[in-house]
Image: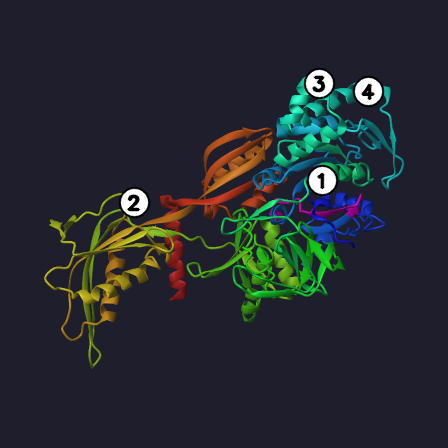
């Protein structure tokens, strides 16, 4: 393969709902680009893109697969992204390295929730979109419905470049209102004839041509002025306006396809070459706020957007050359760690096919193998070049506890999970000291099931998944006092320490008081020392030394605080972390010989425990903001389900044919929610969840939690 100049490269990511035909489209593009001489099918498991065992077995994309095609003296780098929101991390990684998205829309369904999800991601990441209405050859294809749904979803940005003739099982032609040509396909291999537009379609074509001309003029001020003056633009001027509008994200051109029959693929690729942006000059932000322009005459830098472990190859690092010209044998460094890396060989990629190349210019995509430091989201560059800004992924929305079936495999399972997480940044593996569980988080149950499959099939280990414990918090609601004497005598030197303390709730913004009722008497405490701590698990602890008259030596105060902290990490109610408490140590006793640090640790811990139990203790639970995007037909079932989960609907808003429900839901009620939501809506809805705050659990829930914890303690005893 020759080395392509930056201006001749087009990096495109294929987006869309599941079953919209992205993989079939990528196969047709590879066929037109002469990478393959025969197109495979998803059903037969013979496509270049879905080349893993899991994808072929399940007939769906779960990885973002990089491909290439050479067409009209240009190189297309194509990333076939998964259509399920569970695997959206692949699409988001692709946004980092692609200048254009081709959003496939199923002509049978029109705009689906997946269309909305991925188009919003593209807008969020500022990646221009071209829309490809696919499967127009299907007997249930409905062009008018699809067209209406696109207008409703995208508004004035929609620009119809084509319209189909005879959509449905007889679909074999379309009219292009940019070139004003009638394209007829004579076989299922992309062979086409170009004709003048038939008379019966002339009026519609002319009307749509004028609409497209006006939309193109909106892309560039000079063209808009000319259009208002003459009401005419040439085809080249229309391309120029569309190119500028696409680059700005204000125009979304629409094309008509049957990827299965290779209808319209050449025309889409021609348009991408003429209109879609190249990476030339694109600016990448750096972690330090700098900028790197995508030009070949700059120091070399590359960004690794994906890593994968592939059979017979080991770990493969996929990258985009962000600047300069990368040559085989290049010595680069990780700007953030200083670690050196030699790229002894570099490759162009088409799925499992890797073609060795001597060099790759700025803007191009390739891969290297078995790099020591070549992990996902890492920059490798010439010395002195800054690291590229890191990728940002959505919060997890499915979490579970994971453990090895065989306890002897726990270390191996941990290593396997960490390797998988290093390849997929949307997989998070963490051991919770609080919950005493390893928590596995991802974008949905399908996502987690893929992890389980990989551990089983790639690492030959068995794991169990279960509902994770909930990270409750404990706090108090009123003032209470307690005292505790620790006295221990065992022949030699003894242990003695006595602590009297008062606890009360900490409330953000309220000043600490010093007037309390102790033993039935109004008492003013003399605060001699105060310490305030932001707790690692959230909330506050404020500690006050109010001891007078030398009842407890100042040197024992850190020991008392240590004892309190120990109990804060294992609350008296359920063993959860305690938070938002003020503690006043106001009296006590010590012994001139037997008082030691350990005695006051024990006394402080137990005095705090006793005071906590009578201070109106309350269990707090994590509450999450949950935003659900659902077709409006399913609003009722979604709201009913939220009610069963103790969810509270904050508000709702319409968004085209969809409704967005904003709710607050306890984390305890969200286990496997993605699966339930999919079942309720036939897979048509999705959601996001983000931690909001901690709130008191209802009385009946607290009673249940206390009983469960008491039973656990009894079993352990």
Separation of marks 2 and 1 at Cα, in angstroms: 51 Å
Residue 712 location in percent, x, y? 41, 60
Residue 114 location in percent, x, y? 63, 39
In this picture, residue 302 sits left or right of residue 498: right
Separation of marks 3 and 1 at Cα, in angstroms: 41 Å
Separation of marks 3 and 4 at Cα, in angstroms: 22 Å
Q: Which mark is residue 230?
A: 3
Please say whether residue 176 is one of the residues in the magenta stretch: no
- Which of the two residues, 270 or 419, is positioned nearer the viewer here? 270
Q: Is residue 206 above or below residue 126?
A: above
Q: Which mark is residue 20?
A: 1
Separation of marks 2 and 4 at Cα, in angstroms: 71 Å
Residue 354 location in percent, x, y? 75, 58
Q: How is the image coloured?
A: rainbow
Of tags 3 and 4, which is closer to the observer?
Answer: 3
Q: Which mark is residue 508?
A: 2
Numbered range of the magenta stretch: 70-88
Q: Is residue 17 visible?
A: no
Q: Quadrant of residue 99?
A: top right
Task: Say whether marks 2 and 1 touch (CB < 8 Å).
Answer: no
């Amino acid at each position: 393969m020759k080395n392509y100049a930056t201006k001749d490269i087009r990096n495109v990511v294929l987006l869309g709902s599941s079953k919209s035909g992205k993989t079939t489209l990528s196969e047709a593009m590879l066929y037109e680009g002469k990478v393959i001489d025969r197109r495979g099918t998803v059903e037969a498991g013979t496509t270049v893109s879905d080349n893993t065992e899991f994808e072929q077995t399940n007939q769906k994309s779960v990885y973002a697969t990089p491909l290439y095609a050479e067409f009209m003296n240009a190189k297309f780098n194509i990333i076939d992204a998964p259509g399920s929101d569970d695997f959206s991390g692949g699409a988001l990684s692709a946004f980092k390295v692609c200048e254009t998205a081709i959003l496939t829309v199923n002509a049978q369904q029109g705009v689906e929730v997946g269309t909305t999800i991925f188009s919003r991601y593209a807008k969020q990441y500022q990646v221009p979109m071209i829309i490809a209405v696919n499967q127009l050859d299907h007997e249930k294809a409905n062009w008018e419905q699809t067209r209406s749904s696109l207008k409703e979803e995208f508004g004035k940005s929609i620009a119809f470049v084509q319209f189909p003739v005879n959509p449905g099982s007889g679909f074999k032609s379309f009219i292009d209102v940019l070139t004003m040509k009638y394209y007829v396909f004579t076989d299922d291999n992309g062979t086409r004839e170009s004709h003048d537009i038939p008379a019966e379609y002339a009026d519609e074509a002319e009307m749509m041509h004028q609409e497209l001309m006006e939309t193109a003029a909106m892309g560039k001020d000079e063209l808009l002025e000319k259009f208002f003056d003459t009401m005419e633009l040439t085809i080249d001027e229309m391309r120029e306006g569309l190119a500028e509008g696409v680059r700005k994200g204000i125009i979304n051109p629409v094309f008509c396809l049957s990827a299965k029959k290779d209808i319209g693929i050449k025309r889409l690729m021609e348009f991408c070459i003429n209109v879609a942006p190249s990476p030339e000059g694109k600016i990448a932000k750096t972690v330090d706020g700098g900028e790197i322009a995508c030009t070949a005459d700059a120091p070399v830098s590359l960004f690794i957007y994906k890593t994968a472990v592939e059979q017979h190859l080991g770990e493969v690092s996929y990258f985009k050359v962000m600047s300069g010209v990368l040559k085989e044998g290049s010595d680069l460094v990780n700007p953030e760690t200083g670690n050196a890396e030699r790229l002894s060989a570099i490759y162009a990629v088409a799925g499992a096919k890797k073609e060795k190349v001597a060099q790759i210019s700025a803007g191009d995509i390739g891969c290297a193998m078995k790099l020591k430091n070549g992990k996902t989201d890492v920059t490798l560059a010439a010395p002195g070049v800054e690291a590229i800004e890191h990728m940002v992924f959505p919060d997890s929305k499915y979490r579970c506890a994971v453990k090895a079936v065989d306890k002897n495999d726990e270390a191996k399972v941990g290593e396997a999970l960490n390797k998988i997480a290093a390849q997929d940044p949307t997989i998070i593996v963490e051991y919770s000291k609080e919950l005493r569980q390893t928590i596995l988080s991802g974008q949905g149950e399908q996502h987690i099931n893929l992890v389980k499959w990989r551990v089983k099939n790639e690492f030959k280990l068995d794991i169990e998944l279960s509902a994770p414990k909930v990270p409750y918090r404990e706090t108090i609601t009123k003032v209470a006092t307690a005292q505790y004497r620790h006295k221990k005598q065992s022949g030699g030197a003894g242990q003695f320490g006595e602590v009297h303390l008062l606890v009360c709730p900490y409330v953000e913004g309220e000043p600490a008081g010093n007037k309390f009722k102790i033993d039935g008497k109004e008492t003013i405490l003399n605060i001699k020392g105060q310490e305030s701590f932001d707790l690692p698990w959230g909330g506050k602890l404020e500690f006050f030394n109010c001891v007078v008259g030398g009842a407890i030596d100042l040197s024992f105060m850190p020991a008392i605080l240590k004892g309190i902290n120990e109990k804060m990490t294992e609350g008296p109610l359920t063993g959860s972390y305690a938070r938002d408490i003020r503690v006043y140590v106001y009296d006590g006793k010590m012994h001139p010989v037997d008082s030691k640090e350990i005695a006051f640790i024990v006394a402080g811990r137990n005095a705090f425990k006793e005071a906590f139990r009578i201070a109106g203790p309350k269990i707090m639970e994590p509450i999450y903001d949950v935003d659900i995007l659902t077709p409006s037909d399913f609003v009722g079932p979604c709201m009913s389900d939220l009610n069963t989960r103790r969810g509270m609907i904050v508000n709702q808003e319409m968004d085209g044919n969809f409704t967005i429900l904003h709710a607050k839901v306890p984390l305890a009620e969200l286990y496997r929610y993605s699966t339930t939501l999919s079942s309720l809506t036939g897979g048509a809805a999705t959601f996001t969840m983000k931690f909001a705050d901690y709130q008191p659990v209802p009385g009946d829930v607290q009673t249940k939690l206390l009983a469960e914890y008491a039973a656990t303690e009894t079993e352990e005893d």
